[in-house]
């Protein structure tokens, strides 16, 4: 009978920790998408998206058939960021040719200008 047992510590938690850091730092998971908020003013909608880790070169914005499309992807050598795509259907009151975008401190701000409201005009026609 052997009364002396060899101590073998359970290192599974160390292995799990190693896997966690390998996944998060060197192989980041795809980004689910940024947090966004809308705000309306008299002449525009303001859309703000949190995009930490992205530069303006990483972001593409296009409008096709009244659909605003955002694609963002960081280069693989960057440890943070990722890749994602988001689309929004523009209402008839939005002028797709007058959309402005600005990226500052990891926040992308889109200004979606509203079309001027068409006010019906009445003209009186004289009968001769």
Image (cartoon, rainbow, N blue to C red):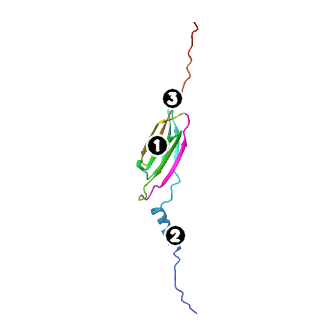
Report the residue at 44% width, 48% height from top: 59
Q: Distance between the Cα atoms at labels 3 and 2?
A: 58 Å
> SS at mark 1?
strand
Q: Nearer the viewer, residue 84 or 36?
A: 84
Identify the residue position indicated by label 3 in the image.
Answer: 116
Q: Distance between the Cα atoms at labels 1 and 2?
A: 39 Å
- Residue 82 is situated, as x and y percent measured from the top left of the image, at 47, 55
Classify 90 as above or below 118. below
Residue 96 at least partly seen: yes
Q: Is residue 110 left or right of residue 91?
A: left
> SS at mark 3?
loop
Classify 21 as above or below 95. below
- Residue 34 is situated, as x and y percent measured from the top left of the image, at 51, 50
Q: Nearer the viewer, residue 5 or 92?
A: 92
Which mark is first along the chain, 1 or 3? 1
Task: Using the image, tell me which numbered label, if any, was put on residue 16.
Answer: 2
Residue 34 at least partly seen: no
Q: Nearer the viewer, residue 68 or 51?
A: 68
- Residue 19 is situated, as x and y percent measured from the top left of the image, at 50, 68
Identify the residue position indicated by label 1 in the image.
Answer: 109
- Residue 83 lies in the magenta-colored region: yes
Report the residue at 52% width, 69% height from top: 16
Query: What range is drawn magenta here?
Result: 78-92
Which mark is first along the chain, 2 or 3? 2
- Residue 7 lies in the magenta-colored region: no
Number of numbered discs visible in the structure rendering = 3
Mark 2 packing: few (<14 Cα in 10 Å), some, or many (20+)? few
Mark 3 near mark 2, Cβ–Cβ under 8 Å? Answer: no
């Amino acid at each position: 009978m052997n009364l002396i047992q060899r101590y073998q510590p359970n290192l599974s938690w160390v292995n799990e920790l190693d896997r966690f850091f390998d996944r998060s730092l060197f192989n980041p998971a795809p980004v689910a998408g940024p947090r966004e908020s809308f705000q309306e003013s008299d002449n525009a909608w303001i859309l703000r998206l949190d995009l930490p880790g992205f530069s303006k070169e990483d972001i593409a914005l296009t409008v096709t058939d009244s659909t605003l499309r955002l694609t963002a992807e960081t280069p693989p050598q960057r440890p943070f960021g990722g890749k994602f795509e988001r689309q929004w259907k523009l209402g008839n009151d939005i002028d797709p040719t007058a959309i402005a975008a600005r990226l500052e401190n990891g926040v992308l701000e889109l200004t979606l200008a509203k079309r001027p409201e068409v006010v019906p005009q009445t003209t009186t026609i004289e009968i001769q």
